[in-house]
Image (cartoon, coloured by chain):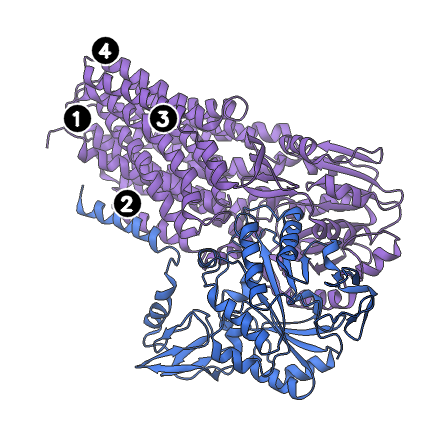
Chain colours: A blue, B purple
Amino acid sequence: MKKREFLGCCAFGAMNLIAAKPLPPRLHAEVDAWLNNGSAEDEPWKWSKEALFVEQAGDSIHCLKCPNDCTIPVGGTGLCRNRVNVRGKLYSIAYGNPCAVHVDPIEKKPLLHFLPGTRAFSIAAAGCNLACLNCQNWQISQVSPKETENQDLMPREVVNECRRAGCASIAYTYSEPTTFYEYAYDAAEIAHGEGIRNVWKSNGYIEEAPLRRLCRVIDAANIDLKSFDENIYARLNAGKLAPVLRTLRIFHEMHVWLEITNLVIPGWTDDLEMIRRMCAWLCKNGLDDVPLHFSRFTPLYKLNQLAPTPVKRLEEAHAAAVKEGIKYAYIGNVPGNAAEHTYCHHCKKMILERRGYSIVTNNLKNGKCMYCSTSIPGVWGL
Amino acid sequence: MAKATMPQRADGWRVTTILAGAITAGTQIVLLREVLCAFLGNELVIGIMLFDWLALTGIGVVLARVWTARLRPSLIPSVVLGSLLVLPPLTLVGFRLLPLLVAPPGSMLEIWIFLVGAVLVLSPVCLVSGAAFSLLVRASAVGGGVNSVGSVYAWEAIGSLAGGALFGVLLFDLVPSQDLLLLLCVGSGVAGAAMAFRARERRSALLLLAGVLLLLIARSVFDVNALTFKLRYPGHTILAHEETPYGVLTATRLGDQTTVFANNIPLLADGDVQNVEETIHFALAQRPRSPRVLIVGGNPSALVPEALKYAGSKVDCIEENPWLRDFQQKFLQPPQNDRVQYFLGDFRQRLRSSTDGYDAIILISPEPSTLQSNRMYTRESMRLAHQALKSAGVLCLSLPSSEDYAGDDAKNVRATLRNTIAETFGNVLILPAGHDIFLASDSTLRADVAAAIAGAGVVTTYANANYIQDDLLGDRAQRLSASLQRATPINTDDHPVLMLAYIRYWLRFFSAESWVPALIFLAVLLFVVRADRVSFGVVAAGCGGIILELMVLIIVQVGFGNVYKMSGALIGLYMAGMSVGAFAGGGMKLTSRVYAAMQSGLALTLLITSSLQYGASSRPLTGVAGLVVCLFVGSLAAGVVFALTSRIMARDPVKTGSRLYSADLLGSAIGALLVGPFLLPLLGVHVVANAAAGVVVVGTIISLTSPVWRVHEKA
């Protein structure tokens, strides 16, 4: 074989190898910095704010916002794609530039025990600190704010727009709000001061200090508890379970209204034994009265070769949760299912009959069951 | 190193060449099917796979020239057949299991794993298959003559034709693909052993027989299908599994839910209330009075009952895939009712033949990621639908949801579709819900669908004001519509820009860029750019030939719908033309004029083929006859070019064979990779045909400037 032919073969193989971006996540920030070497921006862009919760690590900066624990060199970017080290200072580049702005029924988050029948002014900036294979909003979660089409909406304007839209709350949602923490926090603080509620729809992947600070201004949270297995968290979501469990405990302890969503994915998270263990853990940690939503999976993004979740399996999960002691279990993404109603955990009677986002029958008076006067946990009125 | 210029002819080289050709063609067909299943089988992925195949085979040809020079010619048949005895089944198992072992369960392969994995898994079989060509040229050579190159090329084409026909006819109807491949390999192994015995190579013969025995034992012990099901569908009960000309269908039961998977993607399932109700009611609520409805594709078991909720409605359902319809009837039981009619066939034929006029036509198709699915979203389909609708009728199409956000690529896809529809219909409304529902009509369209459904008095589970808040939906629709105000090309049958836009959007899943394959192409181009001038003609003919083949397949596909059955015959015809051409070229007068005439013939057929596309739609029989003639004449010309070039290159046969065969494969690889996914959507059929003809002409000119022609003609 001639040298030229050998080199050709090598080039062919190499081109196949480098044709995409198979970078281990930990190398991401380093490579990003290396690629930007010499062309790194001298100044952050307009929608930047100096990041909170950081510590210096030589020239690099250690981000303490989430359990990804990124150490970001000059010119580098965090795994969430929106924390950038510009000349030794870490900036969030998702401040005042949401890529998605909509009004949603609060039940869509889902929050069924929090101001039912109201609407939430919902915003998201690009970025996420996980990489779920089934991400519904991958077009905004798996990219940087520089790659999305954004609006110009500073925190004060978010509150104004929310008021203008007649919404009772502002929801930080769609992507992962932890990654645009500074923006969300500032908007939430203004809203809080003006009597508008704040809703945190998140994967719960956040460190303790930023979370405790956040609890000062957040009124309700819906956290995705994606599974109850570290291995599944690593493979399906590129994350860890333990920090999410800590988040649940802290929200509850800090009296932020909490609801939990568990997406039941066939072959991944539909193991009833695991669901039982999850529910047992919730009960053991005093979260038995936190509404738990079992949500139906439909094939999305890269997880496109699985069947949708059979309704029967969702009902089995629901039954298992109730048996373990969860007081308010729901089934989501299955229109018309009986498990979308709210039943009193004491007398078992239906207190809120729902049809989708509407309440058809309301047997709740002052937050209590009309039949047995048991107090039903939730935030029922403004 | 031993000189290979005076080899002894080995017995049985023709049989070996035919068998090798048949095995490689069969393997390629089976592996293409696996790629469709393991990965989203769009034109880009298929192009990459074919490119890898052809390029690796080309490398095998070159390597064999150097590394097997000491091999005794009498051993060549048994070495070739011995290698091809085990590698194809192993490659098939590798292709089937690799995605299941490497990718997380239920997820598609990352594109970089596919790129690297395909090269790794294909390498052994392709390198050996390429090497086999060089070896067989050596085995067939007599006293340093070079005509054997053309002969081996021709016999190999005959083998490919036989393999293609065998798999094309038997694969889907009688024997599962992996068993058919195994049978072919075992048969070849036995033939190889017999030839080795005749050539007194007893050790080789015994080794071959042992290999055959091992293969049969492995098959009886190791059930690859059972293992695949276990890994792919954990917890499911497999109700049925069938390889069909339209892809692999699998019906499973999980809990109380029946799901039908097509090429491993869930296609039909119970209980998808939101999607079903949005699809039916968003359209029918626009025209609720006794609507006459046509539903194309989808799951009639779920869709029809919703359509029948409208008083006096009549529903026609059409499905083009007979196997899928059997699965539906067997496992999902669509309703039987005198208001419902079920048809089997191409939806365009139905639209053409419809006379009464529909109030609503609902087109349900996978995303336009392939030429086949793109066909439902083209201007031609819109026009036919428009003709088949009443004056105020509504057309409904859908794409995956962009309810919360649509990125630039997603907007491009939607804008292209919107603009394509708007060319035919007066009004287009896009409702971003669980899916993005595109409604089109010449009359007014309502965005307040919940109110419209309630007004029609239809009771629904999901499509009502409890779930759909008209003001919020209207607001999102308005925003999406405003963001799609951009000029885009129109998606047509011969210029499938929507498919390219969709492939670009799909590549975003992996943060990969659409120029990735161009990089691979450049790498190989650099690798063989050193080819001598005379070989350029073969590169150009290989490229032109495969473009001709792809164009005919595409034109037939677009004109008639699915071409799986017909594709075997067309590919067979192409191989037959190549074979006849290669034989004929061995006896033709060797002059630059004949050579130039043949290349011109190929270029001309490319030009004629592109202009026949309209004939194929309007006059099917004449059009197809014309395409068949063009395909045969073009492939014959390419075969002659190969044979003439092999004769003009005054070298030893192995060198000539390896140089020319790798040049031919390179040209084919470039054509396969670039045409389907890129050039065709970007430039359209006409321009691609003109460009390919231009490549052939340029290649010919470069080739004719080679001194070998002058030397030969002076002599």
How far is the residue under mark 4 from the one under mark 2?
Answer: 40 Å
Residue at the far bottom in the pictured view: A193
Residue that label 3 marks: B218
Question: What percent of the width, then of the height, locates residue B115?
Answer: 39, 48
Looking at the image, residue A108 sits to the left or right of residue A15; the answer is right
Residue nearest the viewer, comparing B623 with B299:
B299
Residues flagged by tags 4 and 3 on a common chain = yes
Q: Residue at the location (52% across, 54% down)?
A: B506
Q: Nearer the viewer, mark 1 or mark 2?
A: 1
Residue at image x 36%, y 49%? B521
Q: Amino acid at mark 4?
A: Arg
What's the chain of the residue with tag 3? B
**Distance from label 3 to label 2 (Cα)?**
40 Å
Give residue B71's mark: 1
The amino acid type of the residue labelled 3 equals Ala
Residue B413 x %, y %: 59, 57
